[in-house]
Image (cartoon, rainbow, N blue to C red):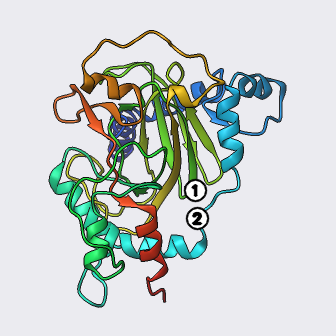
């Protein structure tokens, strides 16, 4: 009887425990997934099978649907996934060095230990850690150690298992989050605040697409729920597996989306505030003190550099 009582208490405690990254119980998790599944418009773009689903999809802006249609056949190839896994491995390669992606994770975790890091790959321009690939002999361009360009309209994001983003907003952009590999959880919020109301929780698998605009679902947190090895995710956590999720993101500024309603009022804020209306900078909530801050959208790697590194990676 005593053992049964203890087991029941342990299960009740586990169900009520609020853990990183979303700080919700298992019951709240179920409720938020149900809310997302019934939301109008749907936060996830999919082919409708029922009348209710059709209504949910019908309310999604046409410009968003167009972006999703253009991305619907995109996937990472098996060799790209295998090469990324090798570069994310927590173990050193035969030459005694970590893979490129693991090196970047270590550098980002050292710079900001408040949450487990993820990797942004810009499809245009140069990026902050391109020099690491150049130093390893993968490219012939002169090394640069500046932060690179900001505001790439298209980015690939690599999410190691159990790593996550802060709560953040995408300003007044319109865009999509398209899952390419692995699995991603996306929590939606009604405002940019640590205590903001949670609108719903949804999971993206390869081929599924979430979306956002300045008025609908602009604030979220992204998390990769796959096996990250030992330990619980949270501040200073670094996973110990090769598992990851990958997503393809498109962010268009207001003047690039003629099919969306625009706010034509002038913004009279200072320059630092003006850029947050575009993809050059986004606002987020700091994990440490729960206050609002801004980050300029520098990327960690350039796609041209990463793809060359992946192509030159020996797979066995």
Q: In which quarter of the image is residue 121?
A: bottom left
Residue 162 position, x and y percent, is 37, 53
Q: Position of residue 173 (x, y in %)?
A: 48, 29
Marks 1 and 2 close (CB-CB < 8 Å): yes
Q: Which residue is drawn at 67% across and 37% down?
A: 45
Which of marks 2 and 1 precedes in the sequence? Answer: 2
Left or right of residue 214: residue 119: left
Locate the N terminus by quadrant. top left
| Percent of width and height locating residue 177 | 54, 42
The residue shown at (18%, 48%) is: 112
Q: Which of 134 and 97 is in front in this view?
A: 134
* Circle number at residue 76: 2
Q: Is mark 1 on a helix, strand or loop?
A: strand
Left or right, 100 with respect to 266, comes to left
Residue 180 is marked as 1
| Image x and y of residue 221, in percent | 41, 36
C-alpha gap between disc 1 and disc 2:
6 Å
Vertical placement of residue 207 versus 41, above or below: below
Q: In this view, does 181 lie above or below 314?
A: above
Q: Which of 79 and 92 is in front in this view?
A: 79
Of residue 311 and residue 304, the one placed in the foreground of this image is 304
Labels in figure, total:
2
The local crowd at label 1, few if under 14, some if 14 to 19, many if 20 or more residues have their Cα within 10 Å, is many
Could you tell me if residue 31 is visible in this image? no
Q: What element carries label 2?
A: loop
- Give the residue displayed 35% in from the left and 45% down from the top: 150
Crowdedness near tag 2: few (<14), some (14–19) or many (≥20) residues, C-alpha within 10 Å: some
């Amino acid at each position: 009887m005593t053992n049964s009582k203890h087991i029941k208490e342990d299960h009740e405690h586990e169900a009520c425990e609020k853990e990183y990254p979303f700080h919700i119980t298992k019951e709240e998790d179920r409720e938020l997934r149900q809310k997302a599944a019934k939301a109008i418009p749907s936060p996830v773009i999919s082919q409708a099978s029922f009348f209710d689903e059709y209504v949910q999809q019908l309310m999604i802006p046409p410009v968003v649907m167009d972006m999703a249609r253009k991305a619907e056949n995109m996937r990472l190839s098996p060799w790209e996934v295998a090469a990324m896994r090798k570069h994310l491995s927590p173990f050193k390669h035969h030459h005694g060095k970590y893979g490129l992606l693991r090196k970047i994770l270590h550098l980002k975790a050292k710079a900001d230990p408040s949450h487990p890091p993820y990797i942004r790959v810009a499809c245009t321009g140069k990026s902050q850690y391109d020099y690491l690939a150049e130093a390893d002999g993968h490219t012939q361009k002169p090394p640069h150690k500046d932060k690179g360009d900001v505001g790439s309209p298209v980015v690939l994001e690599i999410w190691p298992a159990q790593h996550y983003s802060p709560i953040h907003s995408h300003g007044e952009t319109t865009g999509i989050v398209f899952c390419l590999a692995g699995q991603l959880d996306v929590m939606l919020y009604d405002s940019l605040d640590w205590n903001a109301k949670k609108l719903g929780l949804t999971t993206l698998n390869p081929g599924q697409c979430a979306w956002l605009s300045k008025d609908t679902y602009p604030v979220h947190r992204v998390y990769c729920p796959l096996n990250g090895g030992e330990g619980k995710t949270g501040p200073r956590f670094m996973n110990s597996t090769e598992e990851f999720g990958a997503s393809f993101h498109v962010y268009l500024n207001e003047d690039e989306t003629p099919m969306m309603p625009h706010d034509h009022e002038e913004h009279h804020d200072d320059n630092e505030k003006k850029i947050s209306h575009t993809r050059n900078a986004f606002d987020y909530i700091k994990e440490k003190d729960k206050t609002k801050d801004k980050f300029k959208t520098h990327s960690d790697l350039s796609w041209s550099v990463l793809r060359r590194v992946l192509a030159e990676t020996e797979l066995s």
